[in-house]
Amino acid sequence: MTRIHTGLELLKIEKNLQKKIKGNIGLLCHNASIDKGFNHAIEITKSIFGQRLKKLFGPQHGLITDVQDNMVETKDFIHPHFKLPVYSLYSETRIPTDEMLEGIDTLIVDLQDVGTRVYTYISTLGLLMEACGKKDIEVVVLDRPNPVGGNIIEGNILGPSYKSFVGHFPFPMRHGLTMGEVANFCQAHGEGRCSLNVIQMEGWKRSMTFNETDLPWVLPSPNLPTWESAFTFIGTVLFEGTFISEGRGTTRSLEIIGHPNLEPYSFKESFLKKCDLLGLSGFNLRPLYFRPTFQKHAQKTCGGFQIHPTNLQTFRPWTLGQVLCHELYHELGSDFQWNKSPYEYEFERPAIDMINGTHQIREWIEEKRSWEDLKAIEEKDWPQFLDQRESILLYRY
């Protein structure tokens, strides 16, 4: 197995990289900002730069990744061990303020992304780059693997009118980019031009999925317990826009879905026939019953499924999620409901449209239109994205 060195590990061991980090430093990181020996980025940065490390920043879910999902904000505080101010970029503001950035010359970013457009760490990166560009602060991105690989893309491109905190870039749902490449995209095609330095990984190849990296998986957010859940999340995140449970309140959140009025065994029989017709493969749909301890259907027994990836090269979780949503909508009838609660500070549009980045997929589901129609929606705007993507890739193989 090829030894992968993340950006954090290279900064730790290469003096020439350390010398390029100038002035006072801020660090944006979270629970999964670790090296292969489980040493945290704060400890490593502090050991290298000492008193030059002035401020810490946390994304959605908080610096210590202890806070749940949508619109659950975190507060600023003083770190009890490091005695440094910790600023939340998921609070009253999601954009670093002038006060937060005051006295900082370099802002280091070390976040483990999961490769899905709605996962908000790439939005935080884009907004941070915009703010730092206005203040002449250098942004240094310590690159990490895209856990679902860098070759396969899935899903429709975000519609321009659906830009939000869960849709900052005109990306498909599964974008196939690393954080460093997202930063490059922002620099080349976005609004976040700044002084940018990406410390690239060594040893990572685009074809690699997380299980091939020999790196430890640490939850990058509270509901992605395993590296497999980064794959299933691409499809199961859709159910945040419905009253189907996506498994929050269980130990395998976003790997399982269900509803109190779903009988999974009979549904599976007809659904897998549909999958065969559509050529969907690379997964096992295991019927189960579960009882969420909180959130949707708390303390109620739900019938549903755990999605087990079995072939990561053929598995297409976005397509599986959309087809599951389509079939459950028509199977459950009035028991299926779209989630009408506010979603990431959007109070007018349905959550499912904000997640999908379009209203067209919801209409495809409701109108029971053909598989070919979904593929047309998915691939319509791919050419421009693929052209832009090609120009900013850091890893070619």
Image (cartoon, grey):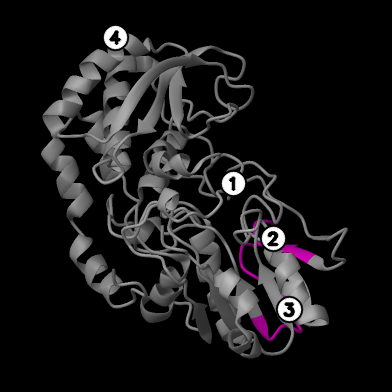
Which secondary structure class fits the magenta region best?
loop
How crowded is the residue under tag 1: few (<14 C-alpha within 10 Å), some, or many (20+)? some
Residue 63 locus on image (x, y percent): 70, 56
Q: Nearer the viewer, mark 2 or mark 1?
A: 2
- Amino acid of disc 2: Asn
Label 2 vs 3, first from the N-terminus: 2
Magenta span contains residue 94: yes
Residue 292 is left or right of residue 178, and the answer is right
Q: Does any portion of residue 59 appear in the rendered image?
A: yes
Quadrant position of residue 233 = top left
Q: Which residue is mark 4?
A: 266
| Quarter of the figure with the N terminus | bottom left
Q: Nearer the viewer, mark 1 or mark 4?
A: 1
Where 126 falls versus 335 (above or below)? below
Residue 178 locus on image (x, y percent): 43, 65
User: Label 4 vs label 3: CA separation?
Assistant: 59 Å
- Amino acid of disc 4: Ser
User: Label 2 vs label 1: CA separation?
Assistant: 15 Å
Where 376 falls versus 113 (above or below)? above
What residue lies at 59% left-to-right and 85% top-to-bottom? 17
- Amino acid of disc 1: Leu
